[in-house]
Image (cartoon, rainbow, N blue to C red):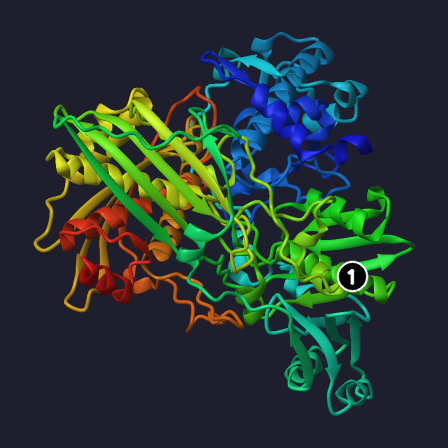
Amino acid sequence: MSLWISCFCYESYRQIKSELIFKMNSFYSGPSIKLYGKLRNWFNFDKNNVLQVYSGKIDIGQHISSTLALISSKITGINYDQVEIIKLDTDISPNEGKTASSLSVPDSGSAIKAASLSLRKAFMKYSLKTLNVNFEDIVFDNGIIKDIKSNRSISYWDYAKTNEFNELTIPEKFDEKEIREFKYKNDHKVEIKTINDIVTGKYEYVHDMIFPKMLHARIIRPPNYFSKFIKFTNNIDQKIKKLDIKIIVKNSFLAILSTDEYLVVKYLDIIKQNIVWEEVKKLSEDTVYNSLKNNDKESLLVKSGGEAFYENIPSIKEFKDKKYTTLTSEYKKGYLMHGPIGPSAACAVFTNNKFTIYSHSQALYDLKLSCSEYFKIDPNNITLKFRPGSGCYGHNGADDVAFEAAVLSKEFPDIHILLKWSREDEHCWEPYGSASLNKLTGVIDTKGKIIYWSNEAFSDTYMTRPSNTELHNFISYNFIHNHFTKYKSSPKTKAHMGIHRNLDPLYDFGETRLVKNLVHDLPLRTSALRTLGAFSNVIALECFINELAKAKNIDPFEIRINHLKDERAIAVIENLKDQMNSKDQGKDLYRGIGFSRYKNSAAFCCVGVELKVNEDLEIKLIDAWISVDAGEVAYEDGIKAQVEGGFVQAASWALYEEVNFDTKEIISKDWDTYKIIGFDNIPNIQTNVIDQLGFPYLGVGEVVAGPTGAAISNALSEALGQTIKTIPFTKEIITKELLET
């Protein structure tokens, strides 16, 4: 694999993707094949009776390995158990960008589907020619073609040794009928890859890595982002060095290391008690919602198609005719953290002017280029190897801890450094999903048609992953350089990026006014949390459409269907309606729904919820229904696992989660101060997957979040007779809004 391809920039990758237009009766291989067109970029047959498949996407618990293996197995005819997905390694894996934005199956799945089809077609042709037989005289079984007359055979593993295999290129387009010839089914029930190792404790996480003479490390954290190291007290640094413990001080970046992990943990707290920090700046003197409204901001107009533009933003229209009903509303959401079950970790070694870094980051190629720039080392001398970690979606602490491990490994050449974040590190130092605010105005006529729609989104940026040009996005980079000025991000303008993801409604609302407001100087560090701005934007949209429906006494299903033109969108909503109607609504139970097509280009999803509210304003989820159309179903159980897991996460966001802080520090330091949903509030979930055989794969990982939050909100509105407009729906927030009304 050529080095220039390995380092191909992500933006070029995405540009190629945007140029591909899916059409019926055609299957497009996707952007990855345009960059990696050789069959050998995707397959390795060096292991006997094993098909090794390369992918540029990583499996962090979303069943991607199982899905990709099943796609290849269906088409190549090799047993699923004999298909192995190689863990991402930047030296050998195709660069498919970040594992993010629900693109793993649409991108890597499409590429592997195309590669598998090319492999089977070429192998079949080669075998018939080599064996000198006709098609009707062969038996094809598990990667082996046998001549039934002579009993001679050829396998994929034989074919892989030929020059033809090494030079074979993959077409960028196939007729769908070429795939249908294999007559595969989409009802496979398979064992999840690695499940045996996971449940038996054999699965290797980055936290578990062991190397000879390895140093265990922890970072000595300051009180907050704006704390400058002044000095140690009581000569604690000198005393500790006598105990086989090493201390690194690089301006305000401090670390403790030892071959004995117990000593590191024990003396970390002792050192913290003997350090003087200078507070350079307070976190905030105001509430975040006041800051969202009043701080300096950059405002962009979002047009149909979801792209943002630096254009004049029109004023909100007024409709004075009495046949029109105008409503306004404001929805708010606090800061959310990723909340991984296990804190982040990384392992790094620096040898012969080369780095090898083991990380669970979703953006290993970005990390490679960032480290190259920071250390001024050729990217070819930096290898990133994926190892599973905390299993968390979005930009949690993975990138930061990998950078910190690399910094420490440079100080101790030839020694592996295993750096682990603590629970407090993860909760207080990861980049959060931003607090946000949506201001809406809608106009509906006497016939129940929404003729005007305005939605302004206010938020901090979601796009601060480190890059070779934005090293300051590593939190420790700032402490190394004593840089305490918050960087002012620039608004992203591409369709459905960051703040304005799913701001553009799929519905036909007549005239729309959509505004993206990037608010500066907000108190907490933010970046990509699952769905980015779509969670709050979809909730605001789906709750406000219910407000308009109530104003005209229109059924929630009806008002949505009446404003949609996409037949697949309508089918998903009607499917959910049928699911919910199959069960009678219980006494004192209340229902709500929410719909979205993620980014208006991924899967269609509609969610229904039934809940009750007790006298203490505690919300109990009883039943949930999910209807999803993700195009052709590659792996149905995988889709269900993704959307049902996503439902639970979104329900937790809606009901419990919020990062709290004061002027000095983050308060939400552990599970007691940052509450998440428990098993006692997981409803009975019924999921229906609509299979669109022959249609392109659609991303499904993030589609359920917004509809889930909206469904819970709309059900709560039915229960209380009033819409609660601040997430999470805690007793305190509900009480406050009820009293204010």
Is residue 210 at least partly visible in the picture?
no
> Where's residue 536, x and y in %?
38, 46
Element type at marker 1? Answer: helix
* 449 vs 171: above or below: below
Would residue 156 appear left or right of 493 to someone viewing this image? right
Residue found at the very far right of the displayed protein: 352
> Where's residue 677, x and y in %?
35, 62
* 563 vs 290: above or below: above
Q: In the picture, residue 506 is in which quadrant? A: top left
Q: In the picture, residue 638 is in which quadrant? A: top left
Q: Of 31 and 222, which appears nearest the observer? A: 222
Residue at coordinates 70% horizontally, 63% vertically from top-left? 209
Q: Of 148 and 186, which appears nearest the observer? A: 186
Q: Of 593 and 47, which appears nearest the observer? A: 593
Would residue 184 appear left or right of 160 to someone viewing this image? left
Quadrant assignment for the N terminus: top right
Total numbered labels placed on residues in the image: 1
Name the residue that disc number 1 marks. Answer: 407
> Where's residue 481, x and y in %?
76, 62
What crowding class fits label 1: few (fewer than 14 Cα within 10 Å), some (14-19), or many (20 or more)? many
Residue at coordinates 39% horizontally, 67% vertically from top-left? 675
Residue at coordinates 69% horizontally, 83% vertically from top-left? 275
Q: Of 59 and 652, which appears nearest the observer? A: 652
Q: In the picture, residue 317 is in which quadrant? A: top left
Kindly identify the amino acid type of the residue bearing the numbered disc 1.
Answer: Val
> Where's residue 386, x and y in %?
67, 50
